[in-house]
Amino acid sequence: MNLIVDIGNTSTKLAVYNGKEKLSQSRINELSYKELEDELTRYKIDKVIISTVKNLPLIISELFLSNIPIVHFLTYKSHLPFKIEYDTPETLGPDRIAAVAGAFSLYSALEVLVIDAGTALTFDFLSSGCYKGGNISPGISMRLKALNQFTDKLPLVSLSGNYTFPGRNTSDAIIAGVITGVTYEINEYIRTFENKLTDFKVLITGGDSELLRNKINHQVTYMPDIVIDGLNYILEYNAK
């Protein structure tokens, strides 16, 4: 069985697969030794893949290495089923690599734009079996925090799906401005790609994707698990 560990900026996803079949999935705010140890006790794990945007504590690395036969730390040097055409692959986040791998496993013959609406808002483009690159901008929570941090008067507001438009109070004005701005940004990216391509697929994932997907004026496929599915695909690909 495969253990998938996806460590992001705000939380960690854990999943267990038997081949392509997902047996369990959970999200935790803080990665702990005990939770991982429990996962190893619950299942007979043969392989693990770790994707992290943070430094992994040594004690957790040792837990994997001492208990699991095959341990794979995802980097740009990993054996991948697609070519990376990126000038600085060493700076490419493993979460972006995993999302593209998930897209490739499903739509290898198509041109695919993967939108990840998380802490950062990322756009990654897959074409003819090659990762062509992408763009990064601040995500919703980062924009809300920036408005508070870099001004004297604006409050830090919590994300809400209910707000007036145009905003009739400062909190609503901030929420409406940020969500509308992100939505316009996504719509324009998709429109730009659609004007150049014919057989084109758009996937959206990430913590804020459920809020945003129905606001987009284009056909998109909501795939909240594309990153962990991609990690499992890479793990299986490297085990061959």
Image (cartoon, rainbow, N blue to C red):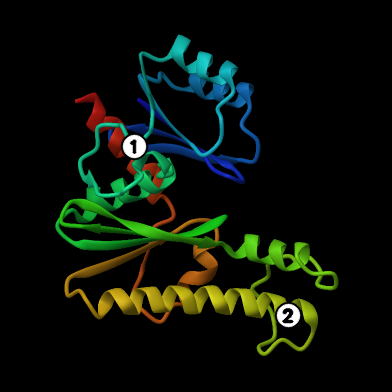
Mark 1 residue type: Tyr
The residue indicated by pointer 1 is 76
Compared with 189, 134 (above or below) is above
In this orientation, does residue 123 appear? no
Q: Quadrant of residue 32?
A: top right
Q: Quadrant of the N terminus?
A: top left
Q: In which quadrant is the C terminus drawn?
A: top left
Give whichever of 89, 140 is nearer the camera: 89
- Badge number at residue 172: 2
Real-space Cα separation, disc 2 to disc 1, in angstroms: 41 Å
- Residue shown at 20% from the left, 74% from the top: 197
Residue 131: % across, % down: 26, 52
Quick one: label 1, few (<14), some, or many (20+) residues within 10 Å?
some
Amino acid type, mark 2? Asp
Of labels 2 and 1, earlier in sequence is 1
State the image quarter where residue 71 is shown: top left
Nearer-the-camera pick, 70 or 143? 143
> Residue drawn at (33%, 43%), measured in percent from left and top?
230
Relative horizontal placement of residue 93, taking residue 130 as reference (left or right)? right
Task: Answer few, some or many: residues within 10 Å of disc 2's Cα (few below 14, many 20 plus, some between 14 and 19).
Answer: some
Q: Which dot, 2 or 1, sits closer to the camera?
A: 1
Residue furthest front in the image: 87
Instruction: Tell me whether circle 2 and circle 1 mark residues in contact (CB < 8 Å).
Output: no
Mark 1 residue element = loop
Outermost residue on the top side: it is 66
Residue drawn at the location 51% of the way across and 65% of the way down: 210
Could you tell me which residue is drawn at 72 percent across and 68 percent down? 147
Residue 124 sits above or below residue 62 on the image: below
